[in-house]
Image (tube, rainbow, N blue to C red):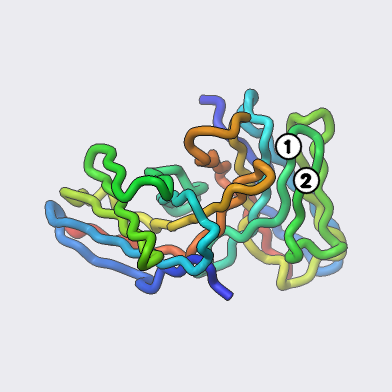
């Protein structure tokens, strides 16, 4: 199975520390998305890459958040100086190229971040 | 400002009966709608979708209905099975720049009792 993978699956950190998450999309997918999900909410969009270019960022993405996708393959999401409000599930999704047809995304299992 | 609303946080249904999950949206620019299913400790998985040029799409036990004038869509599951117990998210996207970034509702937790 070559689905979307995310590492680590769980991360516990102390407030003020930096954390980095990794997402490996499905290999032929050129579009990659990051979402954040908190309890009782649906996934909230954070940022979008097409190949290596970061094309969209949500206003939810504060200056403490940065994402990269070098070489258009895997992506990393870094949170600097974590706050308790950053505790959430961080989801990565990918989708194939093409402008027609279905727009479904393929999600990874997520990284659950707990900031103490 | 929630552009995609799932007003029922939970739904309980008997096995074999129909499950109907509802979703309302406010943004008239949305032209594509999707339903995702999510089990605990897993990411959402795509279930079924519908374009705004259609009013119904069927895939096995799952049917999505779209009422554009009411800005309302619904997911019907017939017959419901215990394995369908999960959180269902409605999502909507608008054509623009090729990103197709969806806006998700808060989800409805479906419990199917044996």
The 10 Å Cα crowd at callout 1, few under 14, some 14 to 19, many 20 or more, is many
Question: Which dot marks residue A69?
Answer: none
The quadrant of the picture occupied by the N terminus of chain B is: bottom right
Residue at the left extreme? B16
Horizontal and vertical percent position of residue B26: 49, 69
| Residue at x 39%, y 58% (from the top left corner) | B87
Horizontal and vertical percent position of residue B6: 41, 68
| Residue at x 45%, y 44% (from the top left corner) | B45
Horizontal and vertical percent position of residue B39: 42, 51
Q: In which quarter of the image is residue B17?
A: bottom left
**Pointer 2 and pointer 1: residues touching (CB < 8 Å)?**
yes
Residue B83 against residue B21 in the figure, above or below = above
The quadrant of the picture occupied by the C terminus of chain B is: bottom left
Q: In this view, does B92 lie to the left or right of A87?
A: left
Mark 1 falls on what kind of element? strand
Horizontal and vertical percent position of residue A68: 82, 42
Label 1 resides on the chain identified as: A
Q: Nearer the viewer, residue A9 or B93?
A: B93
Q: Nearer the viewer, residue A13 or B112?
A: B112
Residue A4 against residue B66 in the figure, above or below = above
In the rendered image, which residue does mark 1 sit on? A50
In the rendered image, which residue does mark 2 sit on? A55
């Amino acid at each position: 199975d070559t689905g979307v993978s995310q590492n680590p699956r769980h991360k516990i950190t102390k407030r003020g520390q930096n954390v980095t998450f990794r997402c490996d999309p499905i290999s032929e997918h050129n579009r990659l998305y990051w979402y954040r999900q908190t309890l009782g909410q649906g996934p909230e969009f954070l940022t979008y890459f097409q190949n290596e270019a970061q094309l969209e960022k949500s206003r939810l993405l504060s200056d403490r958040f940065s994402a990269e996708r070098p070489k258009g393959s895997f992506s990393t999401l870094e949170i600097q100086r974590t706050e308790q409000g950053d505790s959430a599930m961080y989801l990565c999704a990918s989708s194939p190229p093409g402008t027609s047809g279905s727009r479904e995304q393929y999600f990874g299992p997520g990284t659950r971040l707990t900031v103490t | 400002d929630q552009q995609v609303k799932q007003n029922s946080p939970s739904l309980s249904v008997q096995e074999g009966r129909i499950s109907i999950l509802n979703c309302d949206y406010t943004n008239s620019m949305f032209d594509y709608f999707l339903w995702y299913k999510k089990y605990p400790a897993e990411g959402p998985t795509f279930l079924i979708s519908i374009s705004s040029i259609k009013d119904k799409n069927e895939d096995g036990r799952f049917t999505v209905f779209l009422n554009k004038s009411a800005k309302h869509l619904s997911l019907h599951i017939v017959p419901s099975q215990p394995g369908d117990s999960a959180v269902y998210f409605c999502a909507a996207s608008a054509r623009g720049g090729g990103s197709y970034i969806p806006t998700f509702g808060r989800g409805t937790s479906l419990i199917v009792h044996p």
